[in-house]
Image (cartoon, rainbow, N blue to C red):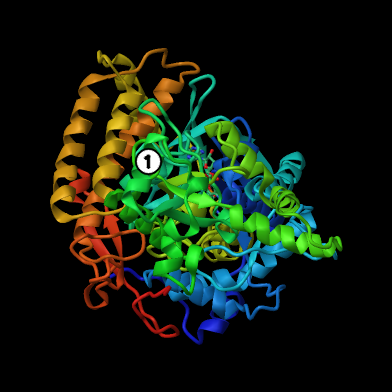
Amino acid sequence: MLDSKTPQGPLADMWTHHKNNIRLVNPANKRLIDVIVVGTGLAGSSAAASLAEMGYNVKAFCFQDSPRRAHSIAAQGGINAAKNYQNDGDSVYRLFYDTVKGGDYRSRESNVHRLAEVSTSIIDQCVAQGVPFAREYGGLLDNRSFGGVQVSRTFYAKGQTGQQLLLGAYSALSRQISKGKVKMYNRHEMMDVVLVDGKARGIVARNLVTGEIERHSAHAVVLASGGYGNVFFLSTNAMGSNVSAAWKAHRKGAFMANPCFTQIHPTCIPVSGHYQSKLTLMSESLRNDGRIWVPAKKEDAEAVRKGTLKPTDIAEADRDYYLERRYPAFGNLVPRDVASRAAKERCDAGFGVNETGEAVFLDYASAFVRYGKTEANVLGLDNPSEAKIKELGKAVVKAKYGNLFDMYRQITDDNPYETPMKIYPAVHYTMGGLWVDYNLMTTVPGLYAAGEANFSDHGANRLGASALMQGLADGYFVLPYTIGDYLADDIRTGPIANDTPEFLEAEKEVKARLESFINNNGDTPVDDFHRRLGRIMWDNCGMARNKEDLTQAIANISALREEFYAKVCVPGKLNGYNPELDKAGRVADLLELGELMCKDALEREESCGGHFREEHQTEEGEALRRDDEFTFVSAWAHKGEPKDAELHKEPLVYENIELKQRSYK
Ligand SMILES: Cc1cc2nc3c(=O)[nH]c(=O)nc-3n(C[C@H](O)[C@H](O)[C@H](O)COP(=O)(O)OP(=O)(O)OC[C@H]3O[C@@H](n4cnc5c(N)ncnc54)[C@H](O)[C@@H]3O)c2cc1C
C-alpha cells in the first residue's frame, strides 16, 4: 500500500501544520547542498529560482535553447486563484471543491486543498515580478471564467498567459544564474537518472549540440519535465515535449500514476490532413463568450459539409446548442471532458460540420451583439444600427481575444469575425504522471516531480487554467519547503562524486543505446512509428475506450515497438547535432508508455473524467464511476515489458467532500 504521507489533522490546517513541523536546512548548510532540476518550464524555472534564492546550489537542464522556450510558453487562457476579486462567492474551499469535483473524485484531497490555498500567493508573486495580467478599467486585476466552475477566478494576460508567467519565472531564474547560484544547461537532455544506494544522486545528460555525454551529481533531483500528450503524435503540445525524463525515472523505480488519464480539449482547430504534425488549441477562454452548436437537422449538416449552405444562413431555430441543451446549469462552460465527449457524440451521430465530419461550431455572433449593445450604452448612442452594434461588439471581442482570432484566421483562412469557428477535441494535457507523495517525492528517495510531470492534483480531469497554477504552486511554494525535509539528512554528506560505478554504468548504457540507434540498418523514419503509435492511441485509448480495443492496442503497440527496433532509420552522426537521434530515443520511450497507458485504461473498469469506458455509462451516456471498486490512484511499478507492470494502489479517502455522481445539468 502506498503511503501518501498526508499529514494528520483538519484539512484547512494541514499545510500550515506540515510547514511548521517538517525539518529545515539552515542557510549555511544549504550552501553545501546541490540540487538538479530537469526542466525549466513554469514548474522547473520557479523551483530552480526559488531553491537557489534559498541558498541551494542548483543545476538546471532543458532541451530547448533557452528556458523561455519551454512548452509552458504556449499556455493561452489563464491561471486560477481563489482571490474572490469578483466578489462572486469564491473561496479556497470552492476552488478545492471545484478541482476535486472537476477531477471526478480521483485526486488526493490534501494536495488539492494546498493547491487552492497557495493559489492566491502565486498571483501576488507574479504581479511582484511584473507579469502584466489583464486589468479592469479601474486598474484592478481582471478575471474570466473557465469550465467546470460558476465563479470568475481566472487571471490572464490576453491569450498569452503562459508566456508572460514564464517570462516572470525566467527573470527570477536569470537573476540566480547571474549570481552563480544556478548553473543553466540549455540544450541538454537528461538521458537517465542515477541511483546510489537507492537514492537519486544525479543524472546522465547529453549535450544536444555536441553529442557529448555528461555525468552530473547532486543530493536530490527534481523532474519538472512536462507531460506526455505527444504519445498521441497529434496534440496541442509543443512537438519537443516528451516523456523520456519521467520514463527513465519510472524504469529506475519511480511509480507511474494514472497514466491513462489524458485530457482531450474540446476547442482545437480540427485535423486538416495526414501530414500534419501539430494541432492548435483555441483557448478555453473562448467558451466564456462563444456558443457551441451544430445544425439541428442532418440535411443542414450535410449541406454545410458540402459547402452548399453557410452556417450564418442557418436560422436560430435550426441550431442545436447542445451543451446549453444538455447542461443548462453550466452550458458552454462544462468541464473539458464533458464538452469533448458531447462534441464527439454529435459528430458520431452525423452532425459534424467540416469535410471529415469531425468539427462543431464555436460562434461569437451573439457575443458581438451583447457586447455591442453595452458599448453603445456606454457611448450614449441612441438607437444604434445593427451594423454599428456589431462593429462595437467586435472591437470589444478583439480587445479580449484578438490574438486568438488572428491565429485562427491565419491557420484556417476563415474570418472568425464573420463566420463561426470550427473546432474539435484534441489531446492536450496528461493528468497522469510520476506518483508523488504529499512532499512531491516519487517512490525513489531524493527524486521529486513537479508540474505536469507528476500526477498530483487533477484526478481524472484537469480544470482549465489549473495547470499553470499547479506548476507554479509546486515550484514557488511547495517544493522549496518539502525538499528540505529530505535534504536535512544530507548536510554532512559532502559533494556527491560523479565517477562512481553507478554513474559509469548509467553512462555506458546511455552510450550503447544511442549507438544502437545510429548503427541500426533500418529504412523507416522515426516519425513514421510515432504517427502509427499516435493513431493506435487515439483510436483505442482516446475519448472512448473499451476492453476489446484496449487489449488489441496493447498487442499492437508491443508489435510496433519490435518493428521500431528492427527497422528504425536514424541518419546523421552520434557525436554532434542530430535531432533525428533525439527523436528516436523519445519515441522509443513513448512506445513503452503507450502500452502502459492502455494497460492502465484496461484495468480501470469504470468511466471517470478523461477516461470513458464505453461499458460503463449511464442511460444518458454520461460517465459512470464505480466508487466502490475504483476510488484509488493506480501506481505502476516497472517490471520489464510495460504490459507486465505491477499495480500498486493508493486509496483515496474523502473526508471533506462527499463523493457524488458529477452533474453539470
Ligand atoms: C496550447 C496549450 C495551451 C495551454 N493553456 C493553458 C492555460 O491557459 N492555463 C493552464 O493552466 N494550462 C494551460 N496549458 C497547460 C500548461 O501549459 C502545461 O501543463 C504547463 O505549462 C506545463 O508546465 P511544466 O513546467 O510542467 O512543463 P513544460 O513547460 O512542458 O516544461 C518542461 C521542461 O522540461 C524540459 N525537459 C523535458 N524533458 C527533458 C529532458 N529529458 N532533459 C532535459 N530537459 C527536459 C523541457 O526542456 C522544459 O524546459 C496549456 C497547454 C497547451 C498545450
Give the number of marks. Answer: 1
Answer above or below: position of 322 versus 202. Answer: below
Quarter holding the C terminus?
bottom left
**Between 632 and 510, the one nearer to me in the picture:** 632
One can see residue 344 in this view: yes
**Between 348 and 70, the one nearer to me in the picture:** 348
- Give the side of residue 57 with respect to residue 266, left or right: right
- Report helix, strand or loop for mark 1: helix
**Between 295 and 438, the one nearer to me in the picture:** 295
Where is residue 656, by image quadrant?
Answer: bottom left
Give coordinates of residue 291: x percent, y percent: 52, 58
Q: What residue is shown at x 38% (from left), y 54% (from top)?
A: 343
Give coordinates of residue 254: x percent, y percent: 35, 53
Where is residue 411, by image quadrant?
Answer: top right
Q: What residue is shown at x 63% (from left), y 69% (from top)?
A: 152
The type of residue carrying mark 1 is Ala
One can see residue 221 in this view: no
Which residue position holds label 1? Answer: 303
- Give the side of residue 353 with respect to residue 493, left or right: left
Give coordinates of residue 57: x percent, y percent: 64, 47
**Between 415 and 549, the one nearer to me in the picture:** 415
Answer above or below: position of 496 versus 335. Answer: above
Give coordinates of residue 435: x percent, y percent: 38, 59
Answer above or below: position of 26 versus 260. Answer: below
Quarter holding the N terminus?
bottom left
Q: Residues within 10 Å of mark 1 (few under 14, many from 20)?
A: some
Q: What residue is shown at x 41% (from left), y 85% (from top)?
A: 655
